[in-house]
Image: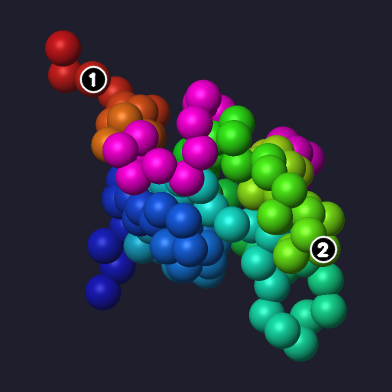
């Protein structure tokens, strides 16, 4: 069954990893992916480097997804550098944005003044959905 349309899959924090992976591998179902504070430094233990999904997408030939990315400017703190091989959440999200630019993906990148804050995510969801679907006003 092909339900292609203007569908969106959303993910916050580690859910953003799942949403991104699903979107680029199932573009026939999910054209749009909304990801907020996605820990793009993550990699499987046997991968040996950080930023697995960024490298995966950089090397993958796929239909183009439409990607909305948000990250807080305060996601650049020292525990990321200490525990995750020198990369912070903010820097890996910026790097991923650059990969999307180089690959020609349609996307929007937004940084806000904040960190990994649940209260912020309501605004993030609203901004992302308005990016994909516009305003009825």
Q: Earlier in the sequence, mark 1 or mark 2?
A: 2
Q: Which residue is mark 1?
A: 135
Question: Split into 4 quadrants, where in the image is the C terminus?
Answer: top left
Query: Residue 7, how many percent across, how many down?
Result: 30, 51
Q: Position of residue 131 (x, y in %)?
A: 38, 28
Q: Who's the residue at 59% across and 57% down the image?
A: 39
User: In the image, is residue 76 above or below residue 127?
Assistant: below
Quadrant the N terminus occupies: bottom left
Which numbered dot is residue 64?
A: none
**Does the image show residue 2?**
yes
Q: Residues within 10 Å of mark 1 (few under 14, many from 20)?
A: few
Residue closer to the observer: 27 or 121:
121
Q: Is residue 114 magenta?
A: yes
Q: What distance separates the C-alpha of mark 1 from that of mark 2?
A: 41 Å
Q: Residue at x 69, y 72 (%)?
A: 43
User: Circle 2 sits in a helix, a strand or a loop, which is it?
Assistant: loop
Q: Quadrant of residue 54?
A: bottom right
**Could you say which quadrant of the image residue 106 lies in?**
top right
Residue denoted by label 2: 85
> From this viewpoint, which residue is outermost toward the top?
137
Residue 49 % position (x, y): 83, 71
- Residue at the location (36% across, 62% down)? 29
> At numbered mark 1, what does the secondary structure look like: helix, strand or loop?
loop
What's the coloring here? Answer: rainbow
Specify whether 111 is left or right of 50.
Answer: left
Seen from the viewer's position, the closer of residues 27 and 113 is 113
Q: Which region of the structure is painted magenta?
A: 98-121
Determine if the magenta segment contains residue 115. yes
Q: Is residue 47 left or right of residue 72?
A: right
């Amino acid at each position: 069954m092909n339900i292609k349309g203007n569908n969106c899959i959303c993910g916050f924090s580690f859910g953003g990893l799942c949403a991104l992976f699903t979107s680029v591998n199932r573009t026939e179902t999910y054209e749009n992916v909304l990801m907020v504070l996605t820990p793009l430094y993550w990699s499987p233990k046997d991968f040996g480097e950080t930023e697995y999904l960024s490298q995966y997408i950089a090397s993958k030939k796929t239909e183009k997804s439409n990607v909305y990315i948000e990250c807080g400017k305060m996601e650049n703190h020292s525990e990321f550098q200490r525990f995750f091989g020198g990369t912070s959440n903010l820097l890996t999200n910026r790097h991923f944005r650059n990969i999307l630019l180089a690959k020609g993906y349609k996307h929007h990148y937004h940084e806000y003044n904040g960190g990994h804050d649940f209260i912020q995510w309501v605004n993030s969801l609203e901004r992302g959905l308005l990016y994909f679907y516009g305003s009825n006003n």
